[in-house]
Amino acid sequence: MEMDTPERTHVVSSSTAISKVEESPVFNFLNNLSPIKPAKPVHLTQTFSSLTFASPPAIFTSPHISSDRESRFLGRCQTVNISEQKSPSKNVDKSSTNEGDESELQDNLEKGKSIASTPVEQPTGHTEFANEVPHTFMYDFGSPDCGPIRKVGLRRCQNIDHPQQEDPKNNQTEQRCDWESLVSDAADLLIFSSPNDAEAFRGIIQKSPGLERGLGTSLSNLPQNNITDSQKMQHSFQLDSGEQADAEVTLESLEIKKAQEDLGCDDLASMGIHPSGGLEDEATPFGLFADGKSLSNLQHGMRRRCLDFEMVGVHCRKKFPSIRSSSHSKDNNTSKNLQLKSLNNKRGGESSRFILPGIGLHLNSLASGNSDCSAEMVEIFPSESQAALLTGQELLPTHMISTTSEKGADESGDIVVEDNSLALVLVDPEELNPDSPRKKRRKVEPGEEAEACKRCNCKKSKCLKLYCECFAAGVYCIEPCACQDCFNKPIHEDTVLATRKQIESRNPLAFAPKVIRGSDSNTENRDESMKTPASARHKRGCNCKKSSCLKKYCECYQGGVGCSINCRCEGCKNAFGTKDGSVLLVADSEAGEELAEKHDVISLKPENLRAEEQAHPSVLPNTPSGLSRPTEQMAFPTSKCKPSQSSFLAKLGNSTEKIGKSKLIILAPPTKFEKPPQQLEGEDEMPQVLRGTTSGMSQKTASPNGKRVSPPHGELSSTPSLRSGRRLILQSIPSFPSLTPQH
DNA sequence: GAGTTTGAAACT
DNA sequence: CAGTTTCAAACTC
């Protein structure tokens, strides 16, 4: 060995020289003199080659070496590998490798920095490491210390969107496992691709003390540069994945990360705030983490996904239950922790659901329900944010962002409301105070929630049948529910799931959104669609006989969609569209009046609307004048809300004048509205749900431009929540006066 | 808040 | 598939 070291140094310093030396008779002579040396080099070489791992020689020689690892891990991985490989290079055998390889090696060395600096012992460890590495990727085995880490690596590999980011991690993890001490030294070389990863590791570490030893040090040692780098990575990641590519969002996320660093990730994790979602998201699905922190991470990750991928529907669904629980207890800060815990638990349960087969439908159903719940969502997030605020308000922005983004994806109208609430949160420290306006708002909410995300009142169904709105929506019952003998609770998750399966077996679409937007008709042409009354339609259609499809008894009407051929209703007067397609006419008729009346109740003041229409008959160019209003009204009457929004928006778009100042404000973000049409395009029920199927309302409503302005809640139908959402909007309106230009 | 109406869900 | 019953929401007072 001793003899080797000097040679190694030589090799490292000048690879070319090495080859010459080897060839030189003197070298051969020396080798002959010391039988030991030759044997080792050969042995090593074989070992590596056999492994197909990048043997030192192989490394030099070529790309072949890289094998699986490199294929998976590009760029940075090479760097890491180089560092690892260095030690091998030291071996005499390695020196024997081709010159071309040497040149590569040098490059690598430059990147990797100091191979020479690595301790002599490394070679041995390195060989081991080399052996292990391939296995690590290929198989899930490992020493107790390394096992978890490797798993993570595997996971990541599977889910990896960005191999580069992961690669570094894997490399690090591996190195740490085998070379903890060495790694610490080389930590500088290693770079976590993303902050997310770092957090994820932290979370892992928390769970597994063993890992913490290995990783903890390295993490702690990570240079700030790495962090920044990771931040950048995350940023890029967001951009890549993210439809939400908003620079602001990313910036905030960065800020959040910084804040986390300042505060300490642990604290943040405890708070349930996790700016970075990356690994967490991935990890959770695998069920790796059971504890609250990990869950919180998951939650955050979930959010992230929504943000990044606009998996809003799913996200919302997952969150919903938790949200509900949290929403109720929001008032007390002390309770917040408990809430969070409960949320975590619930979420965990949800996550499990998420994994379970058949859940998809459930989730979808949730989505529909979620749409309703969007209002809650908004509030809920703030609550969490509040918790976060306890430590630092900085976190809030993320929540806000996330929430908005989510909503944006799912629901335009609700989103607006949320924004308001969020704005309040940020502005007012009072939120923390129970007396804060927010709290007041929440107080209002209970009623709203009850309506919005309807709370059931089941007495005999045990909330395990579709009679139960909660169950039908795929959500657990919560406090507001007045149900009796309720089994639709996390505690009875098994029962709930079993029941679900049973129901699904009977009707696979039982939990799917009842209202489906027709891809074709729906979307943008909805105004035109008035021709086809129900571009968005109820799946099965209604069977109304006495309500004339003008009351919420009618699921079509309730869902804000017109009746279709599927309906067996009698005397259909559905304002959204009659079975026979004579939608508009109806609007003018009784239904329209009724709707208008209801509008009044809502405080929408149909008067204004009418006045507007009169003043601006052209406001709704797409829709026939008569129809436009009625339809809009239609939407309102039921929930008092969502539909109205869209309608308002449309009107507002055309004429901000009368409608008003306050109302217009709410409508504000046009972008959100833009999304719905896209959603409409997706025909698949599931996707729609996930996306947050647009409600008929939104579809119906037309922007002044003729474009559909409104919201997405496709499923408004189901949605009591929509209703609530609208209410919120109305309420929120006052808050936004500033936004509305005063005329 | 109690009672009625209504139509979906569930059952046969 | 049709008819009946059960159920809970929607509605009315």
Image (cartoon, coloured by chain):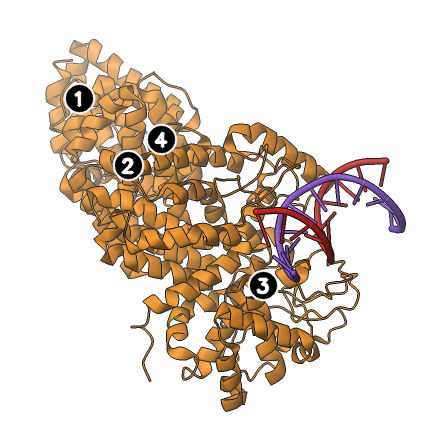
Chain colours: A orange, B red, C purple
Secondary structure state at the residue bearing disc 2 = helix
Q: Earlier in the sequence, mark 4 or mark 3?
A: 4
Could you tell me residue A91's position as x and y percent? 20, 22
Is the residue marked by circle 1 packed among few (<14), some (14-19), or many (20+) residues within 10 Å? Answer: some
Asked if residue A553 shows in the view, the reply is yes
Mark 3 or 2 closer to N-term? 2
Tell me the chain of label 2: A
Q: Residue at x 58, y 82 (%)?
A: A622
Label 3: chain? A
State whether residue C6 is above or below residue A622: above
Mark 4 vs 1, N-terminal side: 1
Mark 3 lies on residue: A638
Is circle 2 on the same chain as circle 4? yes
User: Disc 4 designates what residue?
Assistant: A292
Label 3 vs label 1, nearer the camera? 3
Q: Is residue A707 left or right of residue A274?
A: right
Q: Which residue is found at the position 59% from the left and 41% from the top?
A: A471
Residue, disc 2:
A334
